[in-house]
Image: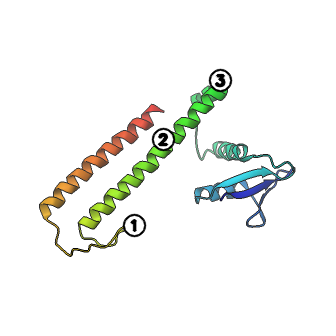
Amino acid sequence: MAYVIKRYSNRKLYDTQESRYVTLEEIEEMIRAGREIAVVDASSGEDLTSVTLAQIILENERNHRATLPTAFLHQLIKHGQAWQDFVQRSMKSSLEGIVSNQREMERIFQDWASRAGWGMVGPRAEPRRDGAEPDAERLREEVSTLRERLRSLEERLERRKNQK
């Protein structure tokens, strides 16, 4: 469930769950901590989430904490909604790919750790039940396979970064 932040006409932001006023920086921290945020106009109920998130990005730009390329910003303005839709789809696809790759790597590591007899490794691993010592040659092959898969995932990620 999203944290609801009400924006009043005086531009103050009120966190309805914590019952306190918050700043843009605090909203940024909430998002970085993994919270889903929804910002609504206190009087009309209009969704102001996108505007507020854009404002956070612009504040970061002004403080030089993040730098969007000027050429990118020019294209974004020049091509308007069509470009914004493209960027939004591309970013969503890229983020989904990164999350998917991260989950796959975690699954591979958990499987490998379980086979290596490491017992409980991370929140999803299960202890080894067979009690057998793993075969060293088999483990070398698995490590080699994992390295190849990791290299492949890194190449895919690099290609996606270069397409931007």
Numbered label attached to residue 53: none
Residue type beneath disc 1:
Arg
Identify the residue under disc 3: 78
Identify the residue under disc 2: 94
Name the residue at 73% across, 57% down: 4
* Image coords of residue 134 (percent x, y): 17, 67
Image height of 53 relative to 83, above or below: below
Image quadrant containing the N terminus: bottom right
Q: Is residue 73 visible?
A: no
Image height of 110 relative to 82, above or below: below
* Image coords of residue 88 (percent x, y): 58, 37
Name the residue at 50% across, 45% down: 95
Identify the residue under disc 1: 124
Name the residue at 34% across, 45% down: 153
- Precedes in sequence: disc 1 or disc 2: 2
The reply to whether discs 1 and 2 touch (Cβ–Cβ < 8 Å) is no
Between the residue at mark 3 and the residue at mark 2, the CA separation in whole angstroms equals 23 Å
Between the residue at mark 1 and the residue at mark 2, the CA separation in whole angstroms equals 25 Å
* Label 2: which secondary element: helix
